[in-house]
Image (cartoon, rainbow, N blue to C red):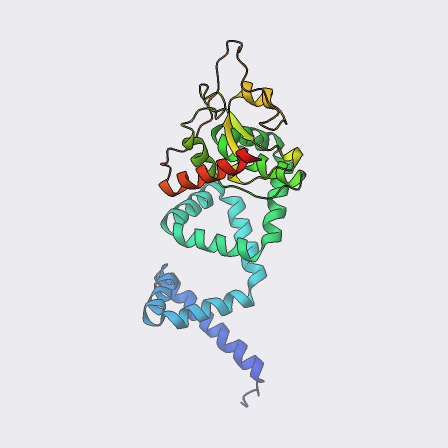
Amino acid sequence: MRRLQLTEEERLARLRAQQRAARERLKAKNPHYSRDATRRMREKDPEAAKAKSKRYYEENQVQIRERVKLRAAANKVKVREQARRSYEKHKLKHLASAKAWQEANPEKVLEAKRKWRRNNAEKQRVATARWAKNHPAEVLVKSGRHRAKKFSAKGRYTIDQLNARILYYGGLCAYCRVTPCEGIDHVIPLTRGGSNWPANLRPVCAPCNSSKGNRLLSEWKGPPREQKPRQPKPLKISPTKLPFSWRRSFVAGDAHVQQQ
């Protein structure tokens, strides 16, 4: 009986079928055969195993993603727990990967943040209010930058510079020197050409700030003599020490502002 002449594709298909049948027989004898064989291959040649996995994923990317989605939908609790354990075990790796992706995709990050704010307006409002309550100094810095930009004023300051300016006056109002600091005042108002540099800033209480308004020191009569009884709300600052070099610069800057 003459043998049939097989083409190359038919020969490879028959060979793969024979290999599959052999694997199935081995699996029937040992249910963990595939897992054990994979582990042995990875231990013997990790680079070859990695290349094979990568090649398989590239060739079957759509099917793999579909299987992952179906599995995740059917086992939500289990998948969430596995993701949590993986994150805790490889936390630094996950953080580095997330940071690299964010730096490489700034547009997608911004769009995701905007989308979250649109869909969670109430959560965003509560979170913003809580952050502002716990970080009053940061709020002052942000509002100061916004007002300086509005009036085209030069200069900017950091949280440390703001804290140092408040500590320089002992946490008290720079004008009455009695009431705790409740805010920041521009000695030369921004509306009258003042800068937003630290030398033009003074810690101020609410009555002095309201009384001074947008006047220059030469136009202002000084702190109000009689104040209504009230409970001041001191501005919280970071517990840092004021460097000696900053003290000297503050003295020089204050003298320059006082002359104007």
Give the residue displayed 41% in from the left and 48% down from the top. 87
To which quarter of the image does residue 154 belong?
Answer: top right
Q: Is residue 199 above or below residue 130?
A: below
Q: Residue furthest front?
A: 259
Image check: 13 left or right of 46? right
Q: Is residue 199 above or below residue 215?
A: below
Can residue 35 be spotted in the picture?
yes
Image check: 93 left or right of 139? left
Q: Position of residue 197 (x, y in %)?
A: 54, 41
Labels in figure, total: 0
Give the residue displayed 51% in from the left and 47% down from the top. 72
Q: Position of residue 14 (x, y in %)?
A: 52, 77
Image check: 241 left or right of 56? left
To which quarter of the image does residue 60 belong?
Answer: bottom right
Q: Residue furthest bottom?
A: 2
Q: Is residue 104 above or below residue 187?
A: below
Q: Nearer the viewer, residue 186 or 260?
A: 260
Give the residue displayed 59% in from the left and 27% down from the top. 218
Give the residue displayed 37% in from the left and 61% down from the top. 35
Q: Which quadrant would the C terminus be assigned to in this image?
A: top right
Q: Position of residue 168 (x, y in %)?
A: 41, 32
Q: Position of residue 246 (x, y in %)?
A: 41, 41
Can residue 130 be spotted in the picture?
no
Q: Nearer the viewer, residue 171 or 106?
A: 171
